[in-house]
Amino acid sequence: MIADDTEVVERNILIKFGLFGEALLEKIAKKQKILNDDFRLSHMIDLLVHLHIIAEVRVNHLNIITEDVDFEKEKVHVVTDVKSNKEKIKYFFPCALPSYDKLNPALTEIQPLLIAWEIKYSGTTTLAIPQGLFPLTIVHLLERKKEEVDFSPDRDSHKFYRYHDAMSLRVYERYFIDIINRYTHLEIHFRGYKKSYSQIVAEVRELLRKVMEKSSKNLKVEEDTKFIFAFKCPEKGTYCIVREKDKSKGKASTWCTECVSQCNVLDLENDDSYRCWFSDQLSSPGNKFASLEGQDPPTKKCGVQHTELDTSNLIHILDILKKHGYSGVDYYYLGLRLGLLPRTLDVIEEESKGNVRNGLRECLKAWLEQKDNVKSVGGPTYDTLIQALRDEEENAVADGIEKDINTKK
Ligand SMILES: [Zn+2]
Protein backbone atom coordinates (compact mmCIF):
# COMPACT_ATOMS: atom_id res chain seq x y z
CA MET A 1 0.00 0.00 0.00
CA ILE A 2 2.74 2.42 0.96
CA ALA A 3 4.74 1.44 -2.10
CA ASP A 4 1.73 2.10 -4.32
CA ASP A 5 1.25 5.51 -2.78
CA THR A 6 4.82 6.55 -3.46
CA GLU A 7 4.49 5.38 -7.01
CA VAL A 8 1.31 7.41 -7.48
CA VAL A 9 3.07 10.45 -6.06
CA GLU A 10 6.08 9.94 -8.30
CA ARG A 11 3.89 9.54 -11.35
CA ASN A 12 1.94 12.67 -10.44
CA ILE A 13 5.16 14.66 -10.15
CA LEU A 14 6.21 13.35 -13.53
CA ILE A 15 2.91 14.36 -15.12
CA LYS A 16 2.57 17.73 -13.44
CA PHE A 17 6.18 18.88 -13.37
CA GLY A 18 7.91 16.58 -15.87
CA LEU A 19 10.34 15.57 -13.14
CA PHE A 20 11.41 12.14 -12.06
CA GLY A 21 14.11 10.35 -10.12
CA GLU A 22 16.09 7.22 -10.70
CA ALA A 23 13.74 5.08 -8.62
CA LEU A 24 10.76 5.63 -10.92
CA LEU A 25 12.81 5.05 -14.05
CA GLU A 26 14.16 1.86 -12.57
CA LYS A 27 10.64 0.63 -11.83
CA ILE A 28 9.49 1.35 -15.38
CA ALA A 29 12.61 -0.13 -16.93
CA LYS A 30 12.26 -3.29 -14.86
CA LYS A 31 8.62 -3.67 -15.78
CA GLN A 32 9.52 -3.30 -19.46
CA LYS A 33 12.48 -5.66 -18.96
CA ILE A 34 14.84 -3.11 -20.53
CA LEU A 35 17.68 -3.53 -18.08
CA ASN A 36 20.22 -6.34 -17.96
CA ASP A 37 23.82 -6.79 -16.82
CA ASP A 38 25.18 -4.96 -19.84
CA PHE A 39 22.61 -2.21 -19.88
CA ARG A 40 22.15 -0.88 -16.39
CA LEU A 41 20.05 1.98 -15.09
CA SER A 42 23.02 4.35 -15.15
CA HIS A 43 23.64 3.48 -18.82
CA MET A 44 20.03 4.21 -19.61
CA ILE A 45 20.18 7.59 -17.87
CA ASP A 46 23.45 8.49 -19.61
CA LEU A 47 21.89 7.60 -22.92
CA LEU A 48 18.76 9.69 -22.32
CA VAL A 49 20.87 12.67 -21.23
CA HIS A 50 23.22 12.21 -24.16
CA LEU A 51 20.30 12.24 -26.59
CA HIS A 52 18.92 15.37 -24.88
CA ILE A 53 15.67 13.58 -24.20
CA ILE A 54 15.96 14.41 -20.54
CA ALA A 55 17.83 17.18 -18.74
CA GLU A 56 19.57 16.77 -15.43
CA VAL A 57 18.27 19.41 -13.04
CA ARG A 58 19.74 20.66 -9.83
CA VAL A 59 17.69 20.07 -6.74
CA ASN A 60 17.41 23.72 -5.81
CA HIS A 61 15.48 24.25 -9.02
CA LEU A 62 12.52 22.71 -7.29
CA ASN A 63 10.04 24.45 -5.17
CA ILE A 64 7.50 21.71 -4.95
CA ILE A 65 5.29 21.91 -1.95
CA THR A 66 2.42 19.99 -0.51
CA GLU A 67 -0.70 20.91 -2.38
CA ASP A 68 -3.88 19.59 -3.88
CA VAL A 69 -3.45 19.12 -7.56
CA ASP A 70 -6.27 18.67 -10.00
CA PHE A 71 -5.24 15.69 -12.07
CA GLU A 72 -7.71 15.25 -14.85
CA LYS A 73 -10.52 16.46 -12.63
CA GLU A 74 -9.55 13.99 -9.96
CA LYS A 75 -8.34 15.67 -6.82
CA VAL A 76 -5.15 14.06 -5.71
CA HIS A 77 -3.36 15.16 -2.62
CA VAL A 78 0.24 15.29 -3.64
CA VAL A 79 2.21 14.57 -0.53
CA THR A 80 5.52 15.82 -1.64
CA ASP A 81 7.80 18.39 -0.26
CA VAL A 82 11.31 19.53 -0.83
CA LYS A 83 12.54 17.51 2.11
CA SER A 84 11.34 14.10 1.11
CA ASN A 85 12.03 14.40 -2.58
CA LYS A 86 15.21 16.36 -2.69
CA GLU A 87 17.34 13.31 -3.26
CA LYS A 88 14.98 11.62 -5.66
CA ILE A 89 14.04 14.13 -8.33
CA LYS A 90 16.86 14.74 -10.69
CA TYR A 91 15.67 14.67 -14.27
CA PHE A 92 13.34 16.70 -16.42
CA PHE A 93 11.46 14.95 -19.20
CA PRO A 94 9.33 17.48 -21.15
CA CYS A 95 7.54 14.81 -23.21
CA ALA A 96 5.84 13.47 -20.07
CA LEU A 97 3.95 16.70 -19.55
CA PRO A 98 0.34 17.05 -20.69
CA SER A 99 -0.52 19.28 -23.64
CA TYR A 100 -2.03 22.70 -23.20
CA ASP A 101 -5.68 22.98 -24.12
CA LYS A 102 -6.03 26.70 -23.71
CA LEU A 103 -3.39 29.38 -23.52
CA ASN A 104 -4.08 32.56 -21.67
CA PRO A 105 -4.71 35.54 -23.92
CA ALA A 106 -2.63 38.72 -23.92
CA LEU A 107 0.59 36.94 -23.19
CA THR A 108 2.91 39.70 -24.13
CA GLU A 109 3.18 43.36 -24.85
CA ILE A 110 5.41 42.79 -27.85
CA GLN A 111 4.99 40.65 -30.93
CA PRO A 112 5.96 37.03 -30.50
CA LEU A 113 9.08 36.01 -32.38
CA LEU A 114 8.68 32.97 -34.61
CA ILE A 115 11.37 30.41 -35.33
CA ALA A 116 11.10 27.98 -38.23
CA TRP A 117 12.50 26.87 -41.56
CA GLU A 118 11.43 28.31 -44.88
CA ILE A 119 9.81 25.82 -47.21
CA LYS A 120 9.62 27.08 -50.78
CA TYR A 121 7.33 25.30 -53.16
CA SER A 122 6.26 26.64 -56.56
CA GLY A 123 6.40 30.28 -55.58
CA THR A 124 4.80 29.84 -52.17
CA THR A 125 6.78 30.10 -48.96
CA THR A 126 5.53 28.47 -45.81
CA LEU A 127 7.16 27.65 -42.51
CA ALA A 128 7.88 24.26 -41.00
CA ILE A 129 9.84 22.76 -38.12
CA PRO A 130 11.32 19.28 -37.79
CA GLN A 131 9.55 16.84 -35.53
CA GLY A 132 10.93 16.70 -32.01
CA LEU A 133 12.28 20.25 -32.14
CA PHE A 134 10.24 21.54 -29.23
CA PRO A 135 11.26 19.12 -26.42
CA LEU A 136 14.84 19.13 -27.67
CA THR A 137 14.99 22.91 -27.58
CA ILE A 138 13.53 23.00 -24.07
CA VAL A 139 16.09 20.45 -22.85
CA HIS A 140 18.93 22.43 -24.44
CA LEU A 141 17.70 25.62 -22.81
CA LEU A 142 17.57 23.94 -19.40
CA GLU A 143 21.08 22.58 -19.91
CA ARG A 144 22.37 26.12 -19.91
CA LYS A 145 23.60 27.91 -16.81
CA LYS A 146 20.93 28.50 -14.22
CA GLU A 147 21.68 32.24 -14.38
CA GLU A 148 20.70 32.18 -18.04
CA VAL A 149 17.75 29.79 -18.07
CA ASP A 150 15.75 28.26 -15.28
CA PHE A 151 12.31 26.86 -14.66
CA SER A 152 9.46 29.26 -13.99
CA PRO A 153 7.98 28.96 -10.49
CA ASP A 154 6.11 25.68 -10.04
CA ARG A 155 3.65 27.15 -7.66
CA ASP A 156 2.16 29.52 -10.20
CA SER A 157 0.80 26.88 -12.51
CA HIS A 158 -2.10 29.18 -13.36
CA LYS A 159 0.33 31.82 -14.56
CA PHE A 160 3.06 29.79 -16.22
CA TYR A 161 3.01 27.00 -18.77
CA ARG A 162 4.49 23.62 -18.15
CA TYR A 163 3.21 21.42 -20.94
CA HIS A 164 4.81 19.26 -23.56
CA ASP A 165 3.94 21.87 -26.17
CA ALA A 166 4.16 25.11 -24.18
CA MET A 167 6.74 26.01 -21.55
CA SER A 168 7.44 29.12 -19.54
CA LEU A 169 11.04 29.69 -18.56
CA ARG A 170 12.88 32.21 -16.45
CA VAL A 171 15.71 33.87 -18.34
CA TYR A 172 18.56 35.97 -16.95
CA GLU A 173 17.06 35.54 -13.48
CA ARG A 174 14.51 38.30 -13.83
CA TYR A 175 12.57 37.81 -17.04
CA PHE A 176 10.13 35.25 -18.37
CA ILE A 177 9.58 33.84 -21.81
CA ASP A 178 7.00 31.39 -23.10
CA ILE A 179 7.84 28.96 -25.85
CA ILE A 180 4.87 27.53 -27.67
CA ASN A 181 4.92 24.75 -30.21
CA ARG A 182 2.68 25.77 -33.11
CA TYR A 183 3.86 22.76 -35.16
CA THR A 184 4.71 24.91 -38.18
CA HIS A 185 6.89 27.15 -36.03
CA LEU A 186 7.97 27.88 -32.47
CA GLU A 187 6.46 31.00 -30.99
CA ILE A 188 8.44 32.97 -28.41
CA HIS A 189 6.72 35.41 -26.11
CA PHE A 190 8.61 37.81 -23.89
CA ARG A 191 6.63 38.80 -20.82
CA GLY A 192 6.31 42.19 -19.20
CA TYR A 193 8.26 44.13 -21.80
CA LYS A 194 9.40 47.63 -20.98
CA LYS A 195 11.26 50.01 -23.26
CA SER A 196 14.42 49.62 -21.20
CA TYR A 197 14.45 45.85 -21.91
CA SER A 198 15.29 46.06 -25.62
CA GLN A 199 18.85 44.88 -25.05
CA ILE A 200 17.65 41.95 -22.98
CA VAL A 201 15.15 40.97 -25.63
CA ALA A 202 17.99 40.96 -28.16
CA GLU A 203 20.06 38.81 -25.78
CA VAL A 204 17.17 36.37 -25.50
CA ARG A 205 17.09 36.17 -29.30
CA GLU A 206 20.81 35.34 -29.36
CA LEU A 207 20.35 32.75 -26.64
CA LEU A 208 17.62 31.14 -28.73
CA ARG A 209 19.88 31.20 -31.74
CA LYS A 210 22.60 29.28 -29.90
CA VAL A 211 20.13 26.70 -28.67
CA MET A 212 18.46 26.37 -32.07
CA GLU A 213 21.84 25.79 -33.69
CA LYS A 214 22.41 22.92 -31.27
CA SER A 215 18.95 21.50 -31.85
CA SER A 216 19.30 21.66 -35.63
CA LYS A 217 22.64 19.91 -35.42
CA ASN A 218 21.07 17.12 -33.36
CA LEU A 219 18.20 16.82 -35.81
CA LYS A 220 20.62 17.04 -38.74
CA VAL A 221 18.74 19.80 -40.51
CA GLU A 222 21.54 22.32 -40.34
CA GLU A 223 23.35 21.02 -43.42
CA ASP A 224 20.55 21.82 -45.84
CA THR A 225 19.05 25.03 -44.58
CA LYS A 226 19.25 27.45 -41.72
CA PHE A 227 16.36 28.33 -39.47
CA ILE A 228 14.96 31.82 -39.69
CA PHE A 229 13.32 34.30 -37.37
CA ALA A 230 9.97 35.67 -38.46
CA PHE A 231 6.83 37.50 -37.34
CA LYS A 232 3.19 36.98 -38.10
CA CYS A 233 2.42 39.33 -40.93
CA PRO A 234 -0.03 42.00 -39.70
CA GLU A 235 -1.70 42.22 -43.11
CA LYS A 236 -2.21 38.72 -44.34
CA GLY A 237 -1.79 36.51 -41.34
CA THR A 238 1.10 34.87 -43.18
CA TYR A 239 4.72 35.62 -42.38
CA CYS A 240 7.20 38.46 -42.36
CA ILE A 241 10.53 36.64 -42.54
CA VAL A 242 13.46 38.46 -41.02
CA ARG A 243 16.48 38.93 -43.24
CA GLU A 244 19.24 39.63 -40.79
CA LYS A 245 21.98 41.93 -42.02
CA ASP A 246 20.11 42.44 -45.27
CA LYS A 247 22.80 43.33 -47.79
CA SER A 248 20.78 45.94 -49.64
CA LYS A 249 19.89 47.79 -46.44
CA GLY A 250 22.90 47.05 -44.24
CA LYS A 251 20.62 46.09 -41.35
CA ALA A 252 17.91 43.61 -40.48
CA SER A 253 14.71 43.89 -42.49
CA THR A 254 11.67 41.77 -43.15
CA TRP A 255 10.33 40.08 -46.22
CA CYS A 256 6.61 39.33 -46.45
CA THR A 257 5.85 36.02 -48.08
CA GLU A 258 2.58 37.15 -49.66
CA CYS A 259 2.15 40.90 -49.40
CA VAL A 260 2.36 42.86 -52.64
CA SER A 261 3.35 45.93 -50.68
CA GLN A 262 5.89 44.94 -48.06
CA CYS A 263 4.92 45.53 -44.42
CA ASN A 264 8.46 46.36 -43.27
CA VAL A 265 7.44 45.76 -39.67
CA LEU A 266 10.93 46.55 -38.39
CA ASP A 267 10.69 50.09 -39.76
CA LEU A 268 7.29 51.04 -38.38
CA GLU A 269 7.12 54.52 -36.88
CA ASN A 270 6.13 54.58 -33.23
CA ASP A 271 5.87 50.82 -33.01
CA ASP A 272 8.67 48.99 -31.25
CA SER A 273 6.72 45.79 -30.81
CA TYR A 274 8.58 44.05 -33.66
CA ARG A 275 11.90 45.80 -33.79
CA CYS A 276 12.68 45.42 -30.10
CA TRP A 277 13.76 41.87 -30.98
CA PHE A 278 16.35 43.26 -33.40
CA SER A 279 17.11 46.66 -31.90
CA ASP A 280 20.83 45.82 -31.75
CA GLN A 281 20.95 45.08 -35.48
CA LEU A 282 19.03 48.20 -36.38
CA SER A 283 21.04 50.71 -34.45
CA SER A 284 22.67 53.35 -36.55
CA PRO A 285 23.30 57.02 -35.84
CA GLY A 286 20.09 58.94 -36.10
CA ASN A 287 18.00 55.88 -35.36
CA LYS A 288 15.49 57.14 -32.87
CA PHE A 289 14.92 53.78 -31.29
CA ALA A 290 18.56 52.95 -30.68
CA SER A 291 19.13 56.13 -28.74
CA LEU A 292 16.17 55.58 -26.45
CA GLU A 293 18.04 54.53 -23.35
CA GLY A 294 21.23 53.29 -21.85
CA GLN A 295 20.52 49.70 -20.99
CA ASP A 296 21.09 47.24 -18.24
CA PRO A 297 22.51 44.17 -19.93
CA PRO A 298 22.08 40.97 -17.94
CA THR A 299 25.74 40.07 -18.19
CA LYS A 300 27.02 43.27 -16.65
CA LYS A 301 26.34 43.48 -12.95
CA CYS A 302 26.81 46.77 -11.23
CA GLY A 303 25.11 49.18 -8.90
CA VAL A 304 23.63 48.89 -5.45
CA GLN A 305 21.24 46.14 -6.44
CA HIS A 306 24.06 43.74 -7.32
CA THR A 307 26.48 44.58 -4.51
CA GLU A 308 27.24 41.57 -2.38
CA LEU A 309 25.93 41.92 1.16
CA ASP A 310 27.30 40.47 4.39
CA THR A 311 26.16 40.11 8.00
CA SER A 312 26.93 43.78 8.69
CA ASN A 313 23.90 44.54 6.51
CA LEU A 314 21.57 42.32 8.55
CA ILE A 315 19.96 45.08 10.58
CA HIS A 316 19.38 47.22 7.50
CA ILE A 317 17.76 44.33 5.65
CA LEU A 318 15.51 43.57 8.62
CA ASP A 319 14.57 47.26 8.81
CA ILE A 320 13.85 47.61 5.11
CA LEU A 321 11.72 44.45 5.06
CA LYS A 322 9.75 45.69 8.05
CA LYS A 323 9.36 49.14 6.55
CA HIS A 324 7.74 47.70 3.44
CA GLY A 325 5.42 45.45 5.37
CA TYR A 326 7.02 42.02 5.05
CA SER A 327 5.48 39.93 7.82
CA GLY A 328 8.04 37.16 7.72
CA VAL A 329 5.56 34.36 8.39
CA ASP A 330 6.71 32.61 5.22
CA TYR A 331 10.41 33.02 5.91
CA TYR A 332 10.91 29.28 5.37
CA TYR A 333 9.86 29.63 1.71
CA LEU A 334 11.80 32.84 1.29
CA GLY A 335 14.84 30.98 2.62
CA LEU A 336 14.35 28.17 0.09
CA ARG A 337 14.22 30.69 -2.73
CA LEU A 338 17.36 32.39 -1.46
CA GLY A 339 19.21 29.08 -1.73
CA LEU A 340 19.00 27.70 1.81
CA LEU A 341 18.36 24.01 2.20
CA PRO A 342 15.43 22.52 4.11
CA ARG A 343 17.73 21.03 6.75
CA THR A 344 19.13 24.47 7.59
CA LEU A 345 15.66 25.98 7.69
CA ASP A 346 14.35 23.08 9.78
CA VAL A 347 16.99 23.84 12.42
CA ILE A 348 16.14 27.55 12.30
CA GLU A 349 12.45 26.80 12.59
CA GLU A 350 12.97 24.52 15.52
CA GLU A 351 15.31 26.84 17.37
CA SER A 352 13.12 29.89 16.93
CA LYS A 353 10.21 27.98 18.50
CA GLY A 354 7.52 29.71 16.47
CA ASN A 355 8.96 33.20 16.95
CA VAL A 356 8.75 34.55 13.41
CA ARG A 357 10.98 37.54 14.11
CA ASN A 358 13.84 35.35 15.31
CA GLY A 359 13.25 32.85 12.52
CA LEU A 360 13.45 35.52 9.84
CA ARG A 361 16.58 36.99 11.43
CA GLU A 362 18.37 33.62 11.48
CA CYS A 363 17.20 32.83 7.95
CA LEU A 364 18.62 36.11 6.60
CA LYS A 365 21.79 35.62 8.63
CA ALA A 366 22.35 32.21 7.04
CA TRP A 367 21.75 33.81 3.66
CA LEU A 368 24.27 36.60 4.33
CA GLU A 369 26.77 33.96 5.49
CA GLN A 370 26.25 32.28 2.11
CA LYS A 371 25.27 28.92 3.55
CA ASP A 372 24.08 25.97 1.42
CA ASN A 373 23.32 26.96 -2.18
CA VAL A 374 23.07 30.72 -1.64
CA LYS A 375 25.95 31.40 -3.99
CA SER A 376 24.42 29.49 -6.89
CA VAL A 377 21.15 31.42 -6.56
CA GLY A 378 23.00 34.69 -7.10
CA GLY A 379 24.56 35.29 -3.68
CA PRO A 380 23.34 37.72 -1.05
CA THR A 381 22.41 40.85 -3.01
CA TYR A 382 19.35 43.07 -2.96
CA ASP A 383 18.64 41.82 -6.41
CA THR A 384 18.26 38.19 -5.33
CA LEU A 385 16.24 39.26 -2.29
CA ILE A 386 13.88 41.30 -4.47
CA GLN A 387 13.50 38.41 -6.91
CA ALA A 388 12.84 35.93 -4.10
CA LEU A 389 10.16 38.25 -2.69
CA ARG A 390 8.54 38.51 -6.12
CA ASP A 391 8.52 34.74 -6.46
CA GLU A 392 6.77 34.63 -3.10
CA GLU A 393 4.22 37.08 -4.54
CA GLU A 394 5.34 39.79 -2.14
CA ASN A 395 5.39 42.28 -4.98
CA ALA A 396 4.62 45.35 -2.92
CA VAL A 397 7.53 44.61 -0.59
CA ALA A 398 9.82 43.91 -3.56
CA ASP A 399 8.81 47.14 -5.33
CA GLY A 400 9.27 49.18 -2.16
CA ILE A 401 12.76 47.84 -1.53
CA GLU A 402 13.77 48.27 -5.14
CA LYS A 403 12.64 51.89 -5.11
CA ASP A 404 14.36 52.55 -1.81
CA ILE A 405 17.78 51.24 -2.72
CA ASN A 406 17.74 52.81 -6.16
CA THR A 407 17.01 56.26 -4.82
CA LYS A 408 19.86 55.88 -2.36
CA LYS A 409 22.41 55.34 -5.15
ZN1 LIG B 1 3.09 41.59 -44.89
Image (tube, rainbow, N blue to C red):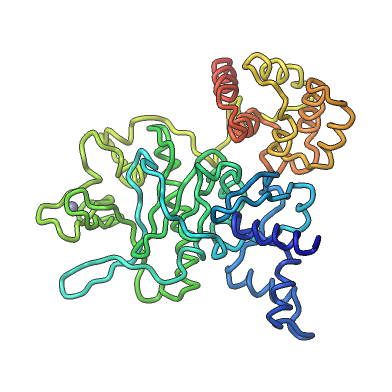
Decide which of 137, 252 is in the foreground and name it: 137
> In this rendering, is residue 191 above or below 312?
below
Instruction: Give the residue at x 74% y 21%.
Output: 313
Q: Is residue 143 visible in the rendered structure shown here? A: no
| Quarter of the N terminus within the rendering | bottom right
Residue 374 in view here: yes
Q: Residue furthest left?
A: 260
Residue 109's x, y, as percent?
A: 36, 38
Count of numbered tags: 0
Q: Quadrant of residue 375?
A: top right
Name the quadrant of the C terminus: top right
Q: At 45% across and 47% down in the image, what residue appears? A: 203
- Name the quadrant containing residue 305: top right
Residue at the extreme right of the image, as rendered: 351
Q: Position of residue 393 (x, y in %)?
A: 58, 31
In the image: residue 243, left or right of residue 82: left
Task: Tell me: residue 206, above or below residue 369.
Answer: below
Query: Which residue is at the front of the view, 191 or 405?
Result: 191
| The one of 28 and 170 positioned closer to us in this rendering | 28
Residue 90 x/y as whole percent: 70, 59
What residue is at 23 percent from the left and 46 percent from the top? 265
Q: Quadrant of residue 21?
A: bottom right
Residue 87, percent from left and from top: 78, 56
